[in-house]
Each structure stands twice: as C-alpha cells, then as structure tokens.
C-alpha cells in the first residue's frame, strides 16, 4: 500500500519553476527528429544516447545539450517537444509551469526566433485549454556568449511581450559572472520583464549576491552555494526570495556527491522559500515527482515538509496573488482528502 508521503507526491498540485524545455528532449524524440530533419548525430540508437549521458560537471552536460537540440528545426518540432513535456508532467500533478527556453542556441543555427517561440507558445496554449495547465515563459540569455548577442535576443523578445514574461541567465557559470550582463538585464527590466538567473550552481555565494544586487533578480535558480554564506541565507529567508533547486540535476552534474547532500532540507530549516524542480529531466533521468521522491527519501522529509515544498512552488511563482491562493487552497483540499482516505 502507498504511504501518505507517496500519495502526497503523486497527487498534490505542483508548479515547476525551473525547467528548460530543450532539456526535456527524450532520446526517442531526438532520433525521430534527426531523421525527419536530416540531421547527423553521433548516436545510432536510444542506448547510444543514454550511454553518453554521464557527466562530471555542468560543461559536460551543456556540450551534449547543445548537440541534442540541433535536431529541433521546425515550429512543429518545438510544438511536439513542448507537448510531450506537458503530457508527461500532467501525470505528475503539475498545474503550472514557468518554462525556460534558450533562443540563442537556435538562432545561432539559423532558426528563426518566431519558429521557436511559435511552437512552444502553441503547445502551452493547448495545455491551458485542454488540461487547465497555466504557464509563463522565461527567455534565458546564454552567459558564455557576449552581452551584445543577449541584446539581440532581447530585441526579438520585445516584439513578443505578450508571450514572454521574464528573462533568465543560463549556460556556463564559471568565468561568466552575473556582472557581465548588467546592462542587458537593466534594459530587460526597463522593458517590463521580470529577472531571474542561474547562480550558485557551480559558482559562489558571491555570484548569488551579485545577481540579487546588480541584475536585481526576483528569484534564484539553483542557489546551492548561497548556503556557504550564513548572512546571505538570512537575507534570502528574510526577503523570502524564492530558490528553484534541482536535486537530481545537482547529483548528475556532481555538484553534490549524494542526494543526502542536497541543500533542500537546509533551506527549509532556514525558512528559505525553496521549491523542487527537474531542470533538464531527460538528460538527468528524473521528472518533477522523481525529484520530490528523491529529496523525501534522501533527506527524510516529513509530510508537512512535502506539503510546504508543493506550496512553495506556487508561492515562489509569478502567478497573480488570487491565482496563487486558488492553487494553495487546492493543495489544502487535496491534503484533507488524502488524510481522510488513509484514516
Ligand atoms: N545550468 C546552466 N545552464 C543550463 C542548465 C543548468 O542547469 N540547464 C540548461 N542550461
Ligand atoms: Zn537550469
């Protein structure tokens, strides 16, 4: 029989706040699209792809992530990719997603910004209509590229403000501090985009502070190394700045030696608004609920802590207050119903 914890993980409504749509590309779809678009890959079979997914650090993963997404060419490809993710996480109880996409990784290959955005948005609209899953899109700047190229992506995004809610910063953190993107983040905020950034994944607590103070981010993606600085942890808790953590991603990229070293429990204990997410679920072999299960088992989280994580996923979202409250009420009702069933 399933435990209450298992039922909570399976059934609670949840939001995902740290998810790269390109990181959901499953090996089967990668090979299908490679064939459809005549793209040469160094893989012959699904097994070849899976065998290649052994990473020693963030850069190892990024190399294969950019290679894999080379099969995405048409608007239909981006639609299929996004719809496959939505169907998969609908089964995990997901009701809201704030999704990253990396347009520069596609426009650099000659794909039009509108092709990428069109396919993603169209699938997200179907998700809202057919499955009542709401969403917001966050466009990430690739931090290994120059700031001038980020400005080009921003100028494309400005033509589609109705579909793009915020800007983020991803790719290689080492050697690319937040400060490199001060001007483009200032411009993006002036254009009305909210700002978030990947910081403290492989980089230091100093990067987290710099992104808060200079880029004026409203949410921290990863933020693991914030826990090296007790004053920063106090600040994050006091300001209730959300952290979007990704435990299985951290494990696969060797940011942590074991799941028991995930800082999720430390964050909960410190009163930080932490949420659990999958990051790139195909590459790291774990979707949203796998991440909840992983921290539950490795960190001995109790039922209340699981409920807090689900609630934090909405509290830390960019949903309007009324919509947040609706989702939080649904969680309370779901908890009541699970407890009644279990006696
Ligand atoms: N970190 C940095 N860049 C990324 C990631 C990540 O976890 N996923 C996709 N691009
Ligand atoms: Zn990420």
Image (cartoon, helix red, strand yellow):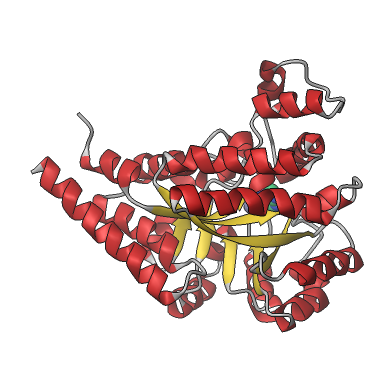
Quadrant the N terminus occupies:
top left
Foreground residue among 42 and 83: 83
Q: How many labels were placed on the picture? A: 0
Residue 120 image point, x, y percent: 67, 50
* Vertical comparison of 335 with 5: above or below: below
**Residue 140 x %, y %:** 72, 60
**Residue 171 in view of the camera:** no
Q: Image quadrant of residue 30?
A: top right
Taking 50 as reference, is 275 left or right?
A: left
Residue 209 located left or right of residue 180: left
Note whether residue 164 is visible. Answer: yes
Q: Residue at x 58, y 43 (%)?
A: 249
Q: Residue furthest front?
A: 129
Q: Nearer the viewer, residue 165 or 105?
A: 165
Q: Position of residue 233 (x, y in %)?
A: 49, 71
The vertical placement of 41 against 148, above or below, is above
Relative horizontal placement of residue 263, taking residue 1 as reference (left or right): right
Q: As drawn, which residue projects farthest toward the left?
A: 343
Please provide percent x and percent y for residue 321: 41, 76
User: Looking at this rendering, what residue extends furthest in the bottom direction?
Assistant: 190
In this view, the residue in front, 324 or 124, is: 124
Q: Which residue lies at the image location 67% right of the left edge and 43% below the top edge? A: 79
State the quadrant of the C terminus: top left
Viewer-closest of 187 and 264:
187
């Amino acid at each position: 029989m399933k435990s209450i914890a298992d039922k909570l993980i399976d059934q609670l409504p949840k939001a995902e706040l740290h998810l790269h749509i390109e990181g959901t590309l499953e090996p089967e779809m990668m090979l299908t699209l490679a064939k459809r678009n005549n793209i040469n890959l160094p893989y012959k079979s699904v097994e070849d792809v899976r065998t290649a997914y052994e990473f020693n650090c963030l850069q190892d993963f990024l190399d294969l992530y950019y290679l894999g997404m080379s099969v995405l060419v048409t608007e239909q490809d981006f639609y299929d990719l996004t719809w496959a993710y939505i169907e998969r996480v609908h089964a995990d109880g997901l009701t809201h997603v704030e999704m990253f996409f990396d347009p520069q990784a596609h426009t650099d290959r000659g794909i039009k910004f509108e092709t990428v955005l069109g396919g993603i948005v169209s699938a997200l609209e179907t998700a809202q209509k057919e499955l009542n899953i709401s969403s917001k899109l966050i466009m990430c700047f690739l931090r290994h590229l120059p700031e001038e190229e980020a400005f080009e992506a921003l100028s494309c995004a400005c033509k589609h403000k109705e579909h793009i809610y915020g800007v983020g910063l991803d790719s290689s953190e080492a050697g690319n501090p937040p400060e490199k993107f001060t001007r483009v983040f200032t411009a993006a905020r002036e254009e009305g985009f909210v700002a978030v950034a990947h910081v403290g994944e492989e980089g230091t607590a100093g990067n987290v502070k710099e992104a808060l103070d200079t880029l004026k981010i409203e949410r921290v993606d990863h933020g693991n190394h914030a826990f090296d600085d007790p004053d920063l942890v106090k600040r994050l808790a006091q300001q209730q700045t959300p952290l979007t953590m990704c435990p299985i991603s951290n494990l696969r990229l060797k940011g942590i030696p074991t799941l028991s070293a995930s800082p999720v429990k430390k964050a909960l204990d410190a009163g930080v608004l932490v949420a659990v997410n999958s990051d790139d679920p195909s590459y790291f072999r774990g979707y949203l609920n796998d991440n909840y299960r992983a921290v539950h088992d490795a960190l001995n989280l109790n039922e209340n802590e699981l409920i807090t994580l689900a609630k934090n996923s909405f509290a830390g979202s960019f949903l309007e207050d009324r919509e947040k409250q609706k989702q939080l009420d649904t969680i309370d009702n779901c908890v009541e119903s699970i407890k009644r069933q279990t006696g």
